[in-house]
Amino acid sequence: MRQVDVAIVGAGLAGLSAARHLSRRGLSVTVLEQADDVGGRVRTDEVSGFRLDRGFQILLPAYPEVRALFSLPRLGPCPFPRAVAVPDASGTRRVLADPRRRPGALPDLFGSRDLSTCDPLALAAVSTRDLLTPANRLLTARDRSTRTELRRWGLSERAIARVLRPFLAGVFLEDRLDTSARFFHLVWRSFARASPVVPSGGMGVLAHDLADRLPAGSIRCDAGVASVENSRAVLESGETVSADAIVVATDGTTAARLLPGLRAPRWNSVTTFYHRSQSSPSDGAVLTTDPHGHLLNTVVLSDVAASYAPRGSTLVSTSVLGVPSDLRGRCGSEVGGPVPPPQFVPRGVGVLLSTRRTRREPLPCEARTGTTEPLTFLRLGTYEACPTGTKEVPKCTLTDTERAVRERLARLHQGTTGDVELVSHYPVARAVPTLTAGSPLRRPVRLAPGLYVCGDHRETPSIQGALFSGRRAAGAALADLRRR
């Protein structure tokens, strides 16, 4: 039995944030992580020279916790253009840019068929108000759905349907715009203050940057926790870790399993496809939405960050809302984990390999087929679920979904993506917790003396929310321990 001041269950951004704040104040901390690496939902896989984030993700440098915890230059930030490409029904893309950064874009905004004459003025009013209003006031404002809030600011139905809904659906991972208007204004404020970026090493460097600043030996990977009880964390191996305080920093569903009485959140889901191409369309770095099609968004990530693709190749990221029916219940999507990427081989032939750098056996994965059974996934043209036992399991194929995505990509990019080949896909059933109008933007992190919980389900569903919840849980634990 090991004894530490604080045991933290989960090495995602929330858990690492809590560990960082506690260790800086002299407490001994052990972080117990079920996976083979840190990061939780914010990880990056390296596949044959490509850097693949587990689902399309961006970093907003204006987030207060990002500024407090990270040195942005050290991350090698690669900014996205402050613009969005909006295709019409034929697929022709029109770029709408922020006139503060592109003064020549102003005529395009007022002359756009996607915006009324008053819409640019309404957007400017929203941005100005959010920039000038302290975040605490935005947090406590009267709440309503984002859809209702946009109408309240005078934005036309045309602008909402063609521009704002498609763009915000990629932020909230829901396209009805039922998300809390208070959260919308907080996010809009961050977009208005600074361009979104991706770190040159991938989004996964955020977790590694935090982990590298913890004392050596603080993090134990492959150390899943089966239960939390009486100041003890019982590992799946049977080992017990005792601590004066325990912080559960897992996703909300796992936290509800470990902490009876805690309510599990509802989730918004997404599936991201990564394709390799030999060429890049013009304005490829500009995020393209798809108001007339079935895509959420697409962007040539290697045009934003050249480090995301090997020399001579182009990496295209494309997301669709939810988990497609031909993936649902298979390939780990039901348990919320992404499908680990295959080793890239031209023409789609290869074998799925573990993301751990030193291991090369086929990666086991769980599928829901009435019962949960470990599977080994092979990639041979299509993805097939190959049971390790005797029970038959249905095929998990990307044929229909990936073909539709590829066809839509060719139309949006006017056929300029060339010989597009699938590198990998990530169905993420538990991408972000839902946050509808009227939901609290801040939930308790102290459950009892010595027991705490953090994660984006205790704050806003964002990197800011995860990091700040870790700070709050660390503060609550520290205050209780000092009273002893």
Image (spheres, rainbow, N blue to C red):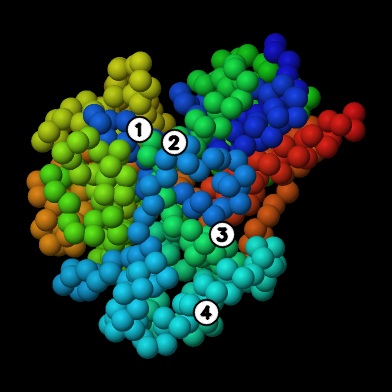
Identify the disc placed on residue 435: 3
Q: Nearer the viewer, mark 1 or mark 3?
A: 1
Q: CA distance from mark 2 to mark 4?
A: 35 Å
- CA–CA distance in space, label 1 to label 2: 8 Å
Q: Residue furthest right?
A: 484
Task: Quarter of the image for the N terminus: give it.
Answer: top right
Give the CA distance from mark 1 to mark 3. Answer: 29 Å
Q: Nearer the viewer, residue 188 or 402?
A: 188
Judge depth for marks 2 and 4 and give the one in front: 4
Kindly tell me whether residue 324 is visible in this rendering.
no
Check residue 125 in the rendering and tell me which mark sits there, or answer none.
4
Across and down, in percent, residue 103 comes to 36, 73
Are the residues tagged 1 and 2 within 8 Å (C-beta)?
A: yes
Neighbours of disc 3 within 10 Å: few (<14), some (14-19), many (20+): many
Write the residue at 29% across / 78% down: 108
Amino acid at circle 4? Ala
Find numbered disc 1 in the image and state the secondary structure of the residue it sits on. strand
Front in this rendered view, residue 456 or 135: 135
For the residue labelled by badge 3, is the local secondary structure a helix, a strand or a loop?
loop
Q: Which mark is residue 204?
A: 2
Q: Amino acid at mark 2?
A: Gly
Give above or below for 349 relative to 184.
above
Whichever of callouts 1 and 2 sits on the residue coming sooner in the sequence is 1
Amino acid type indicated by mark 3 = Leu
Of all residues, the one furthest to the bottom in this rendering is 117
Which image quadrant is residue 331 in? top left
Residue labelled with disc 1? 45
